[in-house]
């Protein structure tokens, strides 16, 4: 299969990006609807910190440690009598009726879906130029650079939000045999990917300049 053209890998990628954009747009619309109807709801409504849901509860990510005195972990078949569960994570669901946490998570979802739609639009524009056989246009270097910056900034924001959600659970919830923790979980691979994208942006910028110089010499 060809890389460029109307029936090519680039065309398939564009289709996948369009489908993903549709899903993100649906999530954005539902997020806005939930934020609008929440003040008038007579019962609890649900919004997730990591994904959208409409129901009766709120969902936030949590990190926790297991109390070894109450929950012994062992493997008799391996002759292991004192194992430990460390760095455990999960989600905490609980009834909530509005409030700042609900509104904050709802607004967060709106921002995340909007940002995802913007990034997908930039990617779609880049892939379209590849499909049309003219990848080295001036706008692509800027598009790719902004995508790289967004990946790095998005990871910092994700880690900060995750830490806040962990802290909220630690400050307000208790569970027998569990101890909630607050962790700043930075994904270094996201930074590496962001830096690689920035390098690719420079490659596109150089390629665009060389392509323009070549056009002037013909």
Image: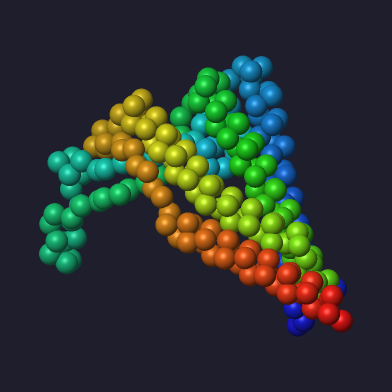
Q: Position of residue 208 (x, y in %)?
A: 73, 69
Q: Quadrant of residue 211?
A: bottom right
Q: Nearer the viewer, residue 125 or 170?
A: 125
Q: Along the horizontal axis of the image, is 179 left or right of 56?
A: left
Image quarter in which the N terminus is found: bottom right
Camera-side residue: 111 or 92? 111
Q: Residue 79's spot in the image, x, y percent?
A: 12, 64
Total of numbered circles in the picture? 0
Name the quarter where the C terminus is drawn: bottom right
Q: Which of 199 and 88 is in front in this view?
A: 199
Could you say where residue 165 lies in the image, as x and y percent from the top left?
Answer: 43, 35
Q: Position of residue 175 (x, y in %)?
A: 30, 32
On the picture, is 176 further left or further right than 37? left
Q: In this view, does 58 lie to the left or right of 3?
A: left
Q: In which quarter of the image is residue 53?
A: top right
In the figure, 172 relative to 1: above or below? above
User: Residue shown at 72%/37% (left/top)?
Assistant: 29
Where, by quadrant of the figure, is residue 167 drawn?
Answer: top left
Residue at 75 percent across and 59 percent down: it is: 139
Q: Is residue 154 left or right of residue 185?
A: right
């Amino acid at each position: 299969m060809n890389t460029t053209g109307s029936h090519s890998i680039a065309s398939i990628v564009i289709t996948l990006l369009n489908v993903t954009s549709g899903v993100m747009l649906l999530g954005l619309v539902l997020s806005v609807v939930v934020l609008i109807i929440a003040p008038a709801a007579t019962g609890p409504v649900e919004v997730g910190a990591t994904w959208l849901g409409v129901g009766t509860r709120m969902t936030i990510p949590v990190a926790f440690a297991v109390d070894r005195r109450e929950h012994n972990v062992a493997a008799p078949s391996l002759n292991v009598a004192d194992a430990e569960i460390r760095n455990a994570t999960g989600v905490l669901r609980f009834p909530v009726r509005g409030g700042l946490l609900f509104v904050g998570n709802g607004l967060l979802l709106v921002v995340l879906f909007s940002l995802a739609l913007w990034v997908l639009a930039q990617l779609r524009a880049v892939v379209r130029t590849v499909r049309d056989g003219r990848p080295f246009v001036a706008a692509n270097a800027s598009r790719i650079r902004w995508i790289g910056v967004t990946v790095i900034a998005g990871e910092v924001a994700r880690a900060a939000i995750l830490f806040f959600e962990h802290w909220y659970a630690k400050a307000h919830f208790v569970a027998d045999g569990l101890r909630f923790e607050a962790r700043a979980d930075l994904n270094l691979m996201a930074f590496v990917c962001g830096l690689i994208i920035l390098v690719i942006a420079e490659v596109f910028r150089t390629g665009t300049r060389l392509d323009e110089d070549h056009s002037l010499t013909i």
